[in-house]
Image (cartoon, helix red, strand yellow):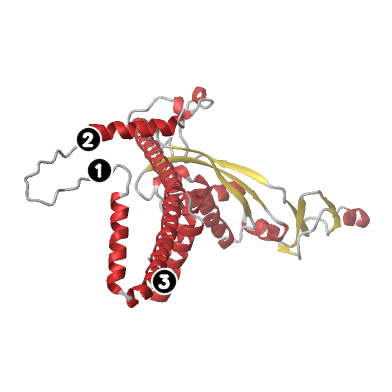
Amino acid sequence: VLICFLVSGMFIVDEKQVAVHSRFGEQRGAPRPPGLHWGLPYPIDQVVRVSTAPKMLKIEDFWLRLREEDKTKNLDELNARSGGLDPATEGALVTGDKAIWHASFKVQYKVPVAGANDFVRNVKDEEALLRVAIKEAAVAEAARMRTEEVWKKPASLAEAVKARAQRELDTLSSGIQLDNVAVPESHYPLQTNAEFLAVNTAENRKQTVINDAQSERQKKLNGMAGAAWSDINAEIEKLDQVKEDAERDTIIARVGELLATKATGEAGGKIKLAQRDREKIVNDTLAEKAQFEALLEPYKRNPELMRLRLSQLMRDDLFGGKGVSKWVLPPNDKQIVLWLGIDPKEIAEREQARLLRVTKGR
């Protein structure tokens, strides 16, 4: 009988379980892992098996009240409701900007081996405890967020709810670990369907205008400076942040270097044209300088002769040009009337000369 009594104290712990072993109500050591174990028979020893497998819990206390035939429909297909919400049957969250919002929560949790003793000691109804912790956290965190955040960033709400609920569970020494909290469903009250759609349409229009403006900006900047515009813009923005003149000069020099070496488009074309014109002006100036220096010594030796020579060269240049008509006035004081037009005879001679050039005398 004694042997049977002692053998009756043997127990098996399945996979994904641990056993919390108590003697006269006092827990004895760490939880027992999966396998065969022995303890004194009940009521001396007591064994409580705790599942360590992940579990799921869905919380719909803040979700819409839907008829059975509406639960399979897309919420956008449902007609707008009249009247207000009935708090006895419909739950909702109140956001920081005093809006009402519906949401459901999906919670994945488990009791890790290290938390099994606390779980057995302090938790009687795990689902009830989790519901209270998640609901309190959801109410608190929604009140800290704007409607737009709750609507467009449900993951942010879920993460905040998870963190707050986990802190509360840890404070209660529940031994429960939240692996994930998600917001699979989020929707505005159907009573505000028209107003929400109007806001949504305005938001979409706003985003379209922003996208068009960004596209136009990109197009113009690319047309102005090519792919180098982003580097140039980044350097220019630095000018608003620096205070030292030396640093500003360095940035300005960098902008100039980018414009000169990397810029394409309209700005790049103008810069390259300016560089070409600069080279021409410099070369012309150097040529004039060389000509001046070549005439300087002869001028020093005989200034009058040099003036006469330059004057003659100027007249030869002036009167020897193509299309220049010359009139020689008689030396007396006789009144002369000039017809300021080209002589028809001269026009005929020029045309004849042009035809000879074109036909090469044929």
Under mark 1, the amino acid is: Ser
Q: For mark 2, give the secondary structure.
A: loop
Side of 83 where 267 appears, left or right: right
Q: CA distance from mark 1 to mark 2?
A: 9 Å
Q: Nearer the viewer, mark 3 or mark 1?
A: 1
For the residues bearing labels 2 and 3, Cβ distance under 8 angstroms: no
Q: Which residue is mark 1?
A: 325
Side of 71 where 33 appears, left or right: right
Under mark 3, the amino acid is: Asp
For the residues bearing labels 1 and 2, Cβ distance under 8 angstroms: yes
Side of 216 where 8 appears, left or right: right
Mark 1 vs mark 2: which is more N-terminal?
1
Residue 26 or residue 195, whichever sits in front: 195
Q: Nearer the viewer, mark 2 or mark 3?
A: 2
Q: Which residue is mark 2?
A: 343
Q: Residue at x 43, y 73 (%)?
A: 247
Q: Residues within 10 Å of mark 3 (few under 14, many from 20)?
A: few
Q: CA distance from mark 2 to mark 3?
A: 64 Å
Residue 27 or residue 119, whichever sits in front: 119
| Residue 95 percent location from the top left of the image | 39, 47
Instruction: Give the number of the disc on residue 249.
Output: 3
| Residue 71 percent location from the top left of the image | 52, 27
Q: Residue at x 56, y 45 (%)?
A: 182
Side of 160 where 277 appears, left or right: left
